[in-house]
Amino acid sequence: MSQNNLYKGFEVELFTGSLNSHIGVSAEIEKKFPDFVKEPDNRNVEYITTPEKDYNFLYEKLITPRKNLRQWLKNKGLTIIPSSTLCFKHDIQFQRSDIDNIYHQFIQDNYGISIATSSVHINIGIDDLNKLFAAIRLIRSEAALYLSISASSPFLNNKLMANHSQRWIQFPKTPRKVPFFTDHNSYIAWIEENIANKNMQNIRHFWSSIRPNGPQRPLILDRLELRICDFVHDINLLLGITAMLELRILNLFENINTLDPLTASIFSIDQLSEICDKNEINAAKDSLNSELIHWQDGKKIICREWIQNLLIDLSSTAEKFNMQHLLIPIYKVLEEGNQSMKWINQYEKGLSIEQIMKFSIDDMIKNEDKSV
């Protein structure tokens, strides 16, 4: 692993519960574990990893909090539920984790249970602002690919939905329209305008597939945050997705003129914004099988084929950084299907959602035990 690799960190949201219901204990978890924070709905909890360059360290950072939490949950007769939506039959009332939190009150009043989803946010460290915004433009243009690999939410309230990522369909993207930022100043002006006109309550209230992040937003930024992925319980696959993302960014830095959508697309930035939004919805519906519009030339392409082409484009960069092995789980998803596809197949063969989740929970535990 080269020192030229970028820093990477994660925000991982989880659902807790039993083998047939969602049970919220996030407020208790936050008190017990310093690396966990509660989410607005008590059935959700999140842990955050510190940034690392080395993928071996990243594996430990991702697996250890989950194992510690699982042991604590086990003593309460609970577990981690791998779906990115409330898959079991559930109370549709919002379940507050913090009744005194004004921002949580706003979320409950305006969005309700639609925000009760779990996901993984991947942060990539980029401290050069010109490179950061070029990367945000490129990765937003291809965000649908990452969603399609990670899709794990075909169920909601004990029903099979019509979407591979029900989470991304129902999640209230805010503000509704997000432009392609041409530079840091355009981002600052847009943020300030949207907070002033109440489209956003605060700087955190920017819920899109991707956004700039940093210690003092919107002024001080040092990373890209990809927010579109569903929860990925297979950590090797999550690291594969992260490696693909990092390689694409490194690839961009070597080919800014030919890969920055600002200069390398036939579309205007307004058109690009519309195309990307449509691609994300199509990917949420049909994931790897979805028909997407390529940001460069406007040609229609099946998502699985686009990912295959991208992996070919990244092969020399992967070899240069000795990261080819990290991409193996991506090829496996292309061959076998993503988590949603596997679950839908099991459901169509007659398994109940409870049985499907039980098998997936067992798989999670086996993989965690292997990491000892």
Image (cartoon, rainbow, N blue to C red):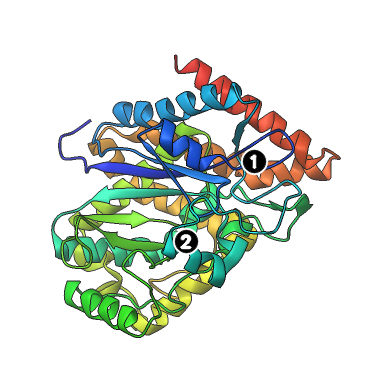
Q: Say left or right for 78 vs 71.
A: right
- Residue for point 71% across, 31% down: 358
Q: Residue 258 occupies which quadrant of the picture?
A: bottom left
Q: Amino acid at mark 2?
A: His
Q: Nearer the viewer, residue 54 or 310?
A: 54
Q: Nearer the viewer, residue 275 or 92?
A: 92
> Is 45 placed above or below 161 here?
above
Q: Residue 127 occupies which quadrant of the picture?
A: bottom left
Q: Say left or right for 335 vs 107.
A: right
From the top left corner, tell me how far across and down residue 186 is, in percent.
22, 79
The residue singled out by tag 2 in the image is 104
The residue singled out by tag 1 in the image is 23
Q: Say left or right for 63 vs 150.
A: left
- Residue for point 54% across, 58% down: 303
From the top left corner, tell me how far across and down residue 17 is, in percent.
64, 37
Q: Nearer the viewer, residue 89 or 234?
A: 89
Answer with mark 2 or mark 1, whichever residue precedes in sequence. Answer: 1
Q: Tell me the quarter of the image containing the N terminus.
A: top left
> Is 209 placed above or below 313 here?
below
Q: Tell me the quarter of the image containing the C terminus.
A: top left
From the top left corner, tell me how far across and down residue 282 is, in percent.
59, 67
Cα separation between marks 2 and 1: 19 Å
Q: Amino acid at mark 1?
A: Ile
Tag 1 secondary structure: loop
